[in-house]
Amino acid sequence: MRIYEVFLKTDGKEEFRHAGSIEAATDELALILARENYARRAEGIHMWVVDRKNICISDEGFIDPNLNKPHRHNDGKKVAKWRKSQRDKKNDG
Amino acid sequence: MNRVWNAIEDFEKFLNDGGVVEPVDDMPNEYRQAVFDFIEMHANSELMGGLTERDWIPKAPGLRHKMTVIAKTQDEIGHAHLLYMIAADLKIKTRKEMMEDLFAGKSKFHNVFHYQAKTWGDQVAIAFLVDAAAVISQQAVFKNCSYGPYKRILKRIIAEEGFHLRFGEESVLRISQGTEIQKALFQQSINDWWWPALQLFGPDSKPNDRLLRWHIKSERNEVLRDKWVQKFVPLLHGYGFTIPDSGLKWDEEENRWEIGPIDWEPLKRTMAMGGPDSARRISEASDSWEKTSWVREALEIVAS
């Protein structure tokens, strides 16, 4: 028996989302069991099942949040400060 | 990938900060065991509940009720299926070992499934009172559950139990508008099921309850039990039924219902597999497992 991860997608605009996992003997049975366990009440119209062993998993820390790279996280503060100063000037005048 | 905690204090700090444990983590053995025991009992209860539900498919009054009971049966068995999978993932017992322990009376399931549902009224009382009690406790677990896989599955279970609750209350409404004989039958069901349903929450939580400390549960048993009482006393009164509790009274000052003393003996008997219907229920579940063994054997052949 193998463990499969189940992904469901509701309509044309939504992305596939993880719904849970299922234990099954074959790919075909995994699809049937996933449908019967996770999609009995219109939870999705498209489904993926993926054998868990085929998922590549990153180590912790592999994804860099890059918080030390402010050029990737422009917070808009400089512009906001300038705009506020313009508004204040207008209100004063 | 997997996290390790060197001391239980570090682990508890992680939990207190809202940490969520995943199966790959190197969790303390006591925590692993506590989560496993809790999920195993939940899984057993879903399975035993599903089998009770199944008994009523041929006997449900009318096609619509029959179809709903079939859907409920599939839901409960589905919940058991998912719960046994995450329980097995904790690597304490395999699914097969959990089944063997259940049939040998070595592992627990909820007290309410140690009683016999004799009439359709009983089945409605279960759907109304027991399912609601189960949802109240599941919601309290879901709210803050520190074990990731369980929290994710509870979300599904609670959503589906919502349908069962609506079915339960709709059936109560229907009976309350029925004949005097039907109403009397349902009053008898309330008399029989009120106390078992109330005891589903268990006795008052101990001050040092590990399930609470480790954020597996988020609310004390007595608080949840009271929440259920405050909701169901007025609901049943509203449908024209009485509560089988001579000590029940309305507290004007506190604006709440006070119940009489609880006799915990029946709960203790069920937990020792000595409930009125424990033996028959367990043997039926075991028979059902035996009868479907050919499916599992076929799957093993296909898998290899």
Image (cartoon, helix red, strand yellow):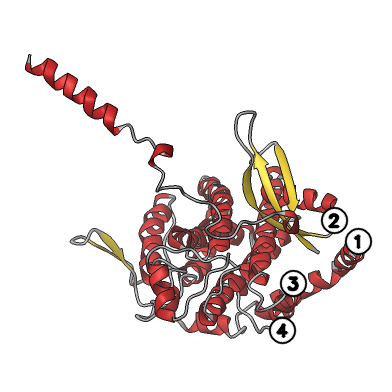
Chain-order first, disc 3 or disc 1: 3
Q: Nearer the viewer's eye, disc 3 or disc 1? A: 1
For the point 22% across and 25% down, the residue is A82
Does B220 sit left or right of A79 as displayed? right
- Whether tag 2 and tag 1 are in contact, CB under 8 A, the answer is yes
Q: Which mark is residue B302?
A: 1
Element class at badge 1: helix
Q: Amino acid at mark 4?
A: Ala
Which residue, given by chain and number where applicable, does mark 2 sit on? A26
Q: Nearer the viewer's eye, disc 4 or disc 1? A: 1
Residue A48 percent location from the top left of the image: 73, 44
Does B291 sit left or right of A74 as displayed? right
Q: Amino acid at mark 2?
A: Thr
Q: Please say whether residue B185 is visible from this viewpoint.
A: no
For the point 44% across and 80% down, the residue is B8
Q: Observer-nearest residue: B275 or B289?
A: B289
Residue B215 percent location from the top left of the image: 43, 69
- Whether tag 2 and tag 4 are in contact, CB under 8 A, the answer is no
Which residue, given by chain and number where applicable, does mark 3 sit on? B285
Real-space CA distance between mark 2 and mark 1, rounded to the nearest whole angstrom: 7 Å
Which residue, given by chain and number where applicable, does mark 4 sit on? B104
- Whether tag 4 and tag 3 are in contact, CB under 8 A, the answer is no
Q: Write down the quadrant of residue B300 in the picture.
A: bottom right
Q: Observer-nearest residue: B64 or B204?
A: B204
